[in-house]
Image: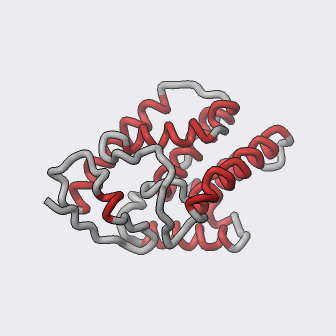
């Protein structure tokens, strides 16, 4: 059976080799894929909520990869592995480790020097992480969970609400979210900060 995926605005398409990484051969539609991924993501959220992590664990490439594997490892063979192809978004595949190192170093500096309010630090991290686009897919959901882990585990504050909607589905909330991402791309983090708590 062939995996037939339709993409909505802002979603990254998978190439054929990446599609071959599907671990559940009975999945053939976007709806089925979303359902299995959501189950896996809920397990990852539960895993993250039951543990305490220190900032020096969270702010590492290894932890970033572990979280992605936890979120998608039951569905995709490439979960937690950096992408090997270039996409319409993100840095060149060869730059991923370097750009991630810059992000981690910057975040550690922000944290140590109290450069930003906790919400802003977590959202700036999330925005840069999704801009790097480390993985073949799931980068938006992964970056949001990473922001939630940072705000909850490092700063002991409530998780973000992200518009209280399913951002994987097309709709008004997703449109507002993507506009906030675009504003952040252009140097204005405020709409994304506001959206994260809406």
> Which residue is located at x 81 percent, y 44 percent?
109
Q: Colour scheme in the image?
A: secondary structure
Looking at the image, residue 47 sits to the left or right of residue 62; the answer is left
If the image is split into quadrants, where does the C terminus sit? bottom right
Where on the picture, by quarter, is residue 179?
bottom right
> Which residue is located at x 63 percent, y 50 percent?
97
Where on the picture, by quarter, is residue 155?
top right
Where on the picture, by quarter, is residue 157?
top right
Residue found farthest to the right: 113
Please provide percent x and percent y for residue 7: 34, 71
Please provide percent x and percent y for residue 73: 36, 41
Residue 195 appears in the rendering = no
Residue 174 appears in the rendering = yes
> Which residue is located at x 44 percent, y 30 percent?
47
Front one among 158 and 100: 100
Front one among 17 and 146: 17
> Which residue is located at x 50 percent, y 73 percent?
88
Front one among 45 and 30: 30
If the image is split into quadrants, where does the N terminus sit? bottom left
- Number of marks present in the image shown: 0
Please provide percent x and percent y for residue 48: 49, 32
Looking at the image, residue 43 sits to the left or right of residue 189; the answer is left
Q: Is 13 placed above or below 198 here?
A: below
Please provide percent x and percent y for residue 137: 42, 57
């Amino acid at each position: 059976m062939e995996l037939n995926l339709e993409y909505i605005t802002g979603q990254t398409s998978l190439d054929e080799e990446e599609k071959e990484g599907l671990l559940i051969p009975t999945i053939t539609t976007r709806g089925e894929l979303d359902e299995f991924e959501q189950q896996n993501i809920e397990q990852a959220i539960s895993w993250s909520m039951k543990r305490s992590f220190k900032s020096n664990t969270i702010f590492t490439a290894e932890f970033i990869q572990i979280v992605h594997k936890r979120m998608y490892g039951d569905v995709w063979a490439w979960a937690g592995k950096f992408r090997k192809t270039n996409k319409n978004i993100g840095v060149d595949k060869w730059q991923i480790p370097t750009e991630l190192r810059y992000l981690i170093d910057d975040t550690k500096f922000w944290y140590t020097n109290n450069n930003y309010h906790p919400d802003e630090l977590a959202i700036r991290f999330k925005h840069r992480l999704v801009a790097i686009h480390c993985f073949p897919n799931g980068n938006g959901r992964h970056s949001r969970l990473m922001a939630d882990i940072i705000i909850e585990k490092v700063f002991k504050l409530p998780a973000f609400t992200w518009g209280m909607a399913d951002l994987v589905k097309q709709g008004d909330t997703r449109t507002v979210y993507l506009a906030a991402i675009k504003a952040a791309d252009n140097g204005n983090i405020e709409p994304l900060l506001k959206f994260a708590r809406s």
